[in-house]
Amino acid sequence: MKKDRSISILLRILSYSISSLIFVFLVIVIFDGAKYFSTEFFTSYPTDGMKSGGIFPAILGSFYMILLSLIFSVPLGIITGVFLAEFSENKLSKIIDMSITSLSGIPSIVFGLFGLSLFSITFGFGTSLIAGALTLSLMTLPVISSATAEAIRALPIELKESAYALGLKRNEVIFKVILPAARKRIITASLIGFGRSIGETAPILLTGAVFYSTSLPKNIFSPVMTLPTHIYYLVAAYGESAKWMAKGTASFLMIFVLAIYLITFLVGGRRNG
Amino acid sequence: MKKVLLLLIVFITSFGISSTLVIKGSNTVFPIAQLWIEEFKKIHPDVEVTLEGAGSSTGIAALFNGTTDIANASRWLKNEEIQKMHEVGKYFIPIVIGYDGIAIIVNKNLNIEQISIETLSKIYTGKIRYWNQVDPNLPKKQILVYSRNTASGTYETFEKKVLNEENMAPWVRMVESTQFEIQTIEQNPYAIAYVGVGYVTEKVKVLKIDGILPTKENILTGKYPISRPLFMFIDATNGYPESGLIKNYITFGLSKRGQELVEKAGYVAAYGF
């Protein structure tokens, strides 16, 4: 009994210290930057050699980039997930499963270089919203598809069997029974993909993001400023005078990602959904 | 799904070509280019300009494949690049826009005022490892040597002007950003690093090289040994642009106002001294 108690105390201390570490990290990043927040910071362009102004074009650019990438990755990811879960006896499915798993282990800069050579140069998109979004969607694809597959596999087998017993065809079972049943977890997966890709720097650094632009993106072929690359360039190319903006941007990005994850937890709260 | 498709169609149909000036290249030239663009935009409100980074080599490569109008560079052309120009029949011309000195910095509390190029080279190549070998009055402490990573133009200049074609010692720490170097020097009494003069803050000490401080005069007259010109390269295969966007931008950059902005960005103006 005594041993049990000491182990439980030990584990408790460990888990508390780890979560407090994360907490301290978040608080430092957020509060260090939040003091620079103002209406101007969120609504104006950076000016005066990054000494004043705001990050409005970067916020908007990040948003466009992620939305566009979700347009590609969510449908594709769900379809792939369904295929993996429902057609798992298929040989092709095993190959896809393996590729998805290895895809998620590829370093993000490799995605960036791949996107640069395929979308920007071969397809001729140049540095543009679409090239960046396609590269990002390649990165989020494994997240969404494996989570979808998992969600479908977790459904009770009776659900499927009774649907078949009622004489539904396979595609009817998939689209009318399985997907609606797994809807919430699929939404959760998409949101996680969203949260992951908004912080990605390397894939869009070479394909879609510019450091400074005088205009907001007009169409999917214009380059954009994004939040993570803005931080990267500020730190890489500027001195002390632009540090405040990097801090402010980091803080905003962190709050944004936290908010997305919070929504994710709220949506995915009920697992049977 | 229909909404998504509609959105996609709206995105694609809004595709149009506007007069955009694309500038790519060196992170070192970023602060100058950003200030120029901001002012340039005030004079020519209908022009759109985008600025991208990722280094001098990337900018020149982009000039070769035609994805940029102007390539910023913090170094002269490499032999391979000149050769490639001959091979593909292109002709790039350099325009000097300012000068950058590389300052050698140490902690404020370290009792040293100057250093010779030779000693510096020995420190970076690993022949000298302790401060008391530099000056017997200094403590017998190991020198913590910091350098920018090899992708940076600052590194290339330092290597060329100081190292004499010798390799850096393996324990030299290669870092991604100048800000990191400055912070380390502030906190560590026995570290040494090199940064562009524009980045120097009051919290670190700049060493004289062979008795010469990196002041404006010394950099412009070439007395200070570790300095370099900063360039814009343009494609002049079909002749020097006599009118148009590129020409206007160059003229602005070399104007009195443009050169003042070079100084504001922390570099030494090339003209009007």
Image (cartoon, rainbow, N blue to C red):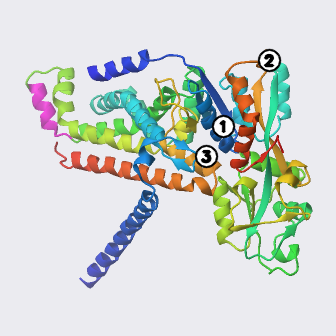
Position of the C terminus of chain A by quadrant: top left
Of residues B156 and B179, which is closer to you in this image?
A: B179
Which residue is found at the position 48% from the left and 40% from the top? A58
On the image, numbered disc 1 is attached to which residue? B36
Q: Which residues are magenta?
A: A155-165
Q: Residue shown at 43%/18% (left/top)?
A: B12
Establish if A65 lies above or below B136: above
Q: Residue at x 18, y 32 (%)?
A: A180
Secondary structure at numbered mark 3:
loop
Residue A158 covered by magenta stretch: yes
Q: Chain of mark 1?
A: B
CA separation in Å, label 3 and label 1: 9 Å
Marking on residue A49:
3
Q: What's the residue type where badge 3 is placed?
A: Gly
Discs 2, 1 touching: Cβ within 8 Å? no
- At label 2, which amino acid type do we have? Thr
The quadrant where residue B8 appears: top left
* Residue A272 marker: none
The residue singled out by tag 2 in the image is: B237
2 or 1: tag closer to the N-terminus:
1
- Give the image location of residue B187, x and y in percent: 64, 71
- The quarter of the rendered structure image containing the N terminus of chain A is bottom left
Q: Please tell me if label 3 and label 2 are on a single chain.
A: no
Q: Residue at x 40, y 29 (%)?
A: A68
Q: Is residue A159 visible?
A: yes
Answer with left or right where residue B193 lies relative to residue A227. right
